[in-house]
């Protein structure tokens, strides 16, 4: 594979440290053509659909991409904002706020958002960072719980980009932070703020994105890490075991996925006499289609239709101050040992310190 040509080299260019904040992705518009492009990229990832390519690709291109884009576009249209896709909007805001938070902590680093599928792509943002002088890049996925279907897929995209570079930057990767105390605290404050305004429910449901059950048996830690996050959040909120439960949403295909499933659980609760349910999605750090449409529309309707009286969706962490604090802490932990100022600034600071100490010019 030929290497990409390097950008024009400038002698004395300051070397920078950077953070690439990675999320799953989103279509460019709530239209069938945009969804066809997005789903084509997403569902052709072997990390996402672990079916032999010779079997899966004809199904994907011959059936799914002919029928699903229009239906998915209608769903996206129901949550689209004037600024665009909610996931893209929140991810961009998080990158901006993370940059400010790191700056306040003395870390003068570049921060850019990127999407595994869709735009801005991981490759394009890595190109941009490299052009700005980034020689050290921290890859920080917005997935608290590690999964081969999400976290590892981000790493695949980074490795693929690196494989096309002649001069590869130093790279570090954040695998997980499902039990990071400040992340749990941010979740708890989000829930408590809702309860302060609306009171507490009969049941708190914590819904995580689903994955096929076979991934658990093949060694994926996602199931266990989701359970630990839920347990730690319940403990922090002081909830007894009979006041909360964990579920998994977003099934696709006919295979068995991680259970219990979210919507059937809500229906069972309603039919059993549970009047009010509050639902939070701890595995999603930004509101998106899966939270705003699947949960706050479809799951809400299912619960109320089955006899439930009151359904409250608690928004994701989004741009909450406690979450930005947690995100900044996670980034700083993994930036340890790397220079967090441009070389020229660091050299100038050393020279000033040396001069103030009465040293001779070097």
Image: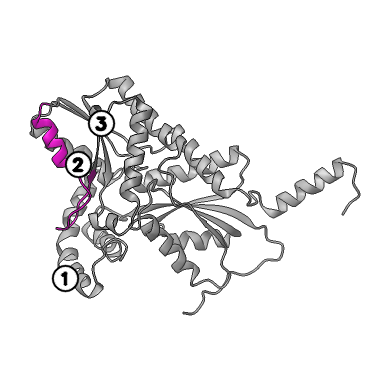
**Helix, strand or loop for disc 1:** helix
Residue at x-position 41% and y-position 46%? 91
Choose the circle earlier in sequence order: 3 or 2: 3
Residue 268 sits inside the magenta stretch? yes
Helix, strand or loop at disc 2?
helix
Residue assigned mark 3: 244
For the point 62% across and 70% down, the residue is: 8
- Residue 82 seen in the current view: no
**Cα separation between marks 2 and 1:** 30 Å
Residue 262 — which label? 2
Left/right placement of residue 225 relative to residue 132 reads left
- Mark toward the viewer: 1 or 3: 3
- Of marks 3 and 2, the one in the foreground: 3
Q: Position of residue 90 (x, y in %)?
A: 39, 43
Specify whether residue 270 is in view. yes
Does residue 95 lie above or below 233 as drawn?
below
Discs 2, 1 touching: Cβ within 8 Å: no
Count the numbered circles shown: 3
Q: Residues within 10 Å of mark 3 (few under 14, many from 20)?
A: some
Disc 1 crowd rating (10 Å Cα; few below 14, some 14-19, many 20+) is few
Q: Give the image location of residue 326, x and y in percent.
A: 48, 38
Q: Please provide the residue range marked out in magenta.
A: 248-273
Q: Earlier in the sequence, mark 1 or mark 3?
A: 1
Q: Does the CB distance between marks 1 and 3 fall below 8 Å?
A: no
Q: Tell me where residue 357 appears, x and y as whole percent.
A: 87, 41
């Amino acid at each position: 594979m030929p290497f990409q040509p390097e950008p024009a080299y400038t002698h004395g260019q300051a070397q920078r440290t950077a953070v690439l904040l990675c999320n799953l992705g989103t279509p460019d518009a709530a239209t069938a053509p945009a969804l066809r492009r997005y789903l084509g990229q997403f569902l052709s990832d072997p990390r996402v659909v672990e079916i032999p390519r010779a079997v899966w690709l004809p199904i994907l291109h011959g059936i799914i991409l002919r029928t699903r884009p229009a239906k998915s576009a209608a769903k996206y249209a129901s949550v689209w904002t004037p600024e665009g896709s909610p996931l893209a909007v929140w991810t961009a805001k998080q990158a901006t706020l993370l940059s400010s938070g790191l700056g306040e902590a003395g870390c003068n680093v570049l921060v850019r958002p990127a999407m595994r599928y869709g735009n801005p792509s991981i490759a394009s943002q890595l190109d941009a960072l490299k052009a700005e002088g980034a020689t050290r890049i921290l890859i920080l996925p917005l997935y608290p719980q590690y999964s081969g279907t999400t976290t590892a897929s981000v790493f695949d995209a980074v490795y693929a980009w690196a494989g096309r570079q002649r001069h590869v930057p130093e790279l570090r990767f954040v695998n997980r932070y499902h039990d990071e105390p400040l992340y749990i605290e941010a979740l708890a404050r989000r829930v408590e703020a809702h309860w302060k305004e609306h009171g507490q429910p009969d049941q708190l449901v914590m819904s995580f994105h689903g994955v096929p059950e076979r991934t658990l048996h093949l060694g994926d830690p996602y199931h266990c890490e989701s359970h630990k996050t839920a347990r730690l959040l319940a403990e922090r909120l002081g909830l007894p075991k009979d006041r909360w439960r964990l579920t998994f949403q977003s099934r696709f295909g006919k295979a068995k996925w991680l259970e219990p499933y979210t919507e059937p659980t809500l229906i069972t609760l309603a039919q059993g006499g549970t009047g009010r349910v509050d639902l939070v999605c701890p595995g999603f750090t930004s509101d998106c289609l899966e939270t705003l449409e699947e949960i706050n529309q479809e799951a809400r309707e299912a619960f109320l239709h089955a006899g439930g009286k009151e359904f409250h969706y608690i928004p994701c962490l989004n741009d909450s101050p406690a979450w930005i604090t947690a995100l900044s802490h996670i980034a700083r932990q993994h930036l340890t040992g790397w220079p967090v100022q441009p070389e020229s600034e660091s050299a100038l600071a050393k020279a000033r310190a040396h001069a103030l100490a009465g040293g001779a010019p070097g």
